[in-house]
Image: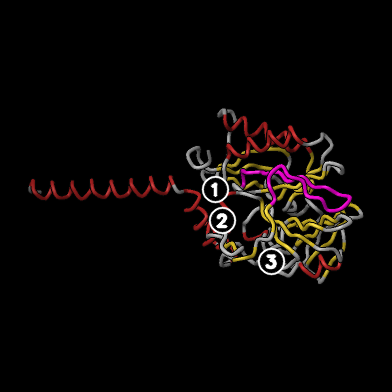
Amino acid sequence: MPATEISTTSRLLAGSLIVVSAIAILMAAFAPYVYGEYDAARGHGAIVGPKPSEPVAGHWVNDYFVVEPVDSTTFAIGEPRYYQGNYSYLIVGSARAVLFDAGTGTRDITPVVRSLTALPVTVIPSHLHYDHVGALGRFDSTALIDDPTLRERVKDSQLTLDRYEFLGLYDHLEPPTFRVDEWWAPGSTVDLGNRRLQVLSTPGHTPTSVALYDEARRQLFLGDFMYPGELYAFLPAASRGAYLKTTKRLLATLGPDTRLYTAHMQDAPASVRAPVLEMADLKALEATLEAIKEGKLSSRGFYPRIFPVRGPITFATGWSWNNQ
């Protein structure tokens, strides 16, 4: 082969290697976004499945929702036929009520809530992913955690979610726009009448995640920060470092007998019931996060990397440069 042809071939190979390397670097750098798009494109089967055959705690409503009383003025509202098994929580005082998480929107949760209380209802999502915001704007008021990154985007009291904040690509949903009526500051207390809820900022799963703590009843409503399954800390804006900081702050704040009411039920063959965890689970998460940070724990999987926590709980995270 003539020298000129060898030189041209070498340049083409070198150029190809540079392009491939650049693509690999970009994919590694933006892995949460690349994986999110890829995972959504793969699909997940039916959004709504048949009734589960496992035992159900509570009673069926409209053949889709399950209402399970936690106590006389607290209700877990489940969607066990939805492929992620979501639960929202109605927290009732003597003057007003709060719906923590707004349902998936696959079916309208509003009539279920109205059947349980005639009081004014404020709905607040634990975070802004697509499966937690279905009924925002459908109740007496909608609240969000008072975060400057959210406030600065509001125009005429309306907020439009962005693609990766909402992640509706998983269910082929467009980001919604809704009215924000109340801003609840982290550390503040919301008085429902003979019942008070402390507003806790809980970044990790998302930067603007929130939890509500009823100290008198030792009830923490926690959303997706933790539940009996695989914890997602590898999608856009998730942070392993924030997860650890939040876990430590919760352990320092909560009473030792606090029960953690979470957002996704355990997979079959577990019975259908509100997904409730204990403080021991939160302590186990702290130990796992510390071990990951120190490089002392082995994982399975390439992306995400999945680490054991306790029982059915695992922690799925990205690479160190994606999820600081």
Q: Is residue 195 magenta?
A: yes
In this picture, residue 300 sits left or right of residue 85? left
Q: Nearer the viewer, residue 81 or 255?
A: 255
Q: Nearer the viewer, mark 2 or mark 3?
A: 3
In this picture, residue 94 sits left or right of residue 282? right
Q: Nearer the viewer, mark 1 or mark 3?
A: 3
Real-space Cα separation, disc 1 to disc 2, in angstroms:
8 Å
Q: Which residue is mark 2?
A: 165
Instruction: Tell me what residue is drawn at x 52 percent, y 45 percent.
Output: 303
Q: Tag on residue 237?
A: 1
Q: Is residue 60 magenta?
A: no
Real-space Cα separation, disc 2 to disc 3, in angstroms:
18 Å
Which is more N-terminal, label 2 or label 1? 2
Quadrant position of residue 307 = top right
Q: Which residue is mark 3?
A: 137
Q: Where residue 71 appears, x then y in whole percent?
A: 90, 52
- Amino acid bearing label 1: Ala
Element carrying mark 3: loop
- Amino acid bearing label 2: Glu
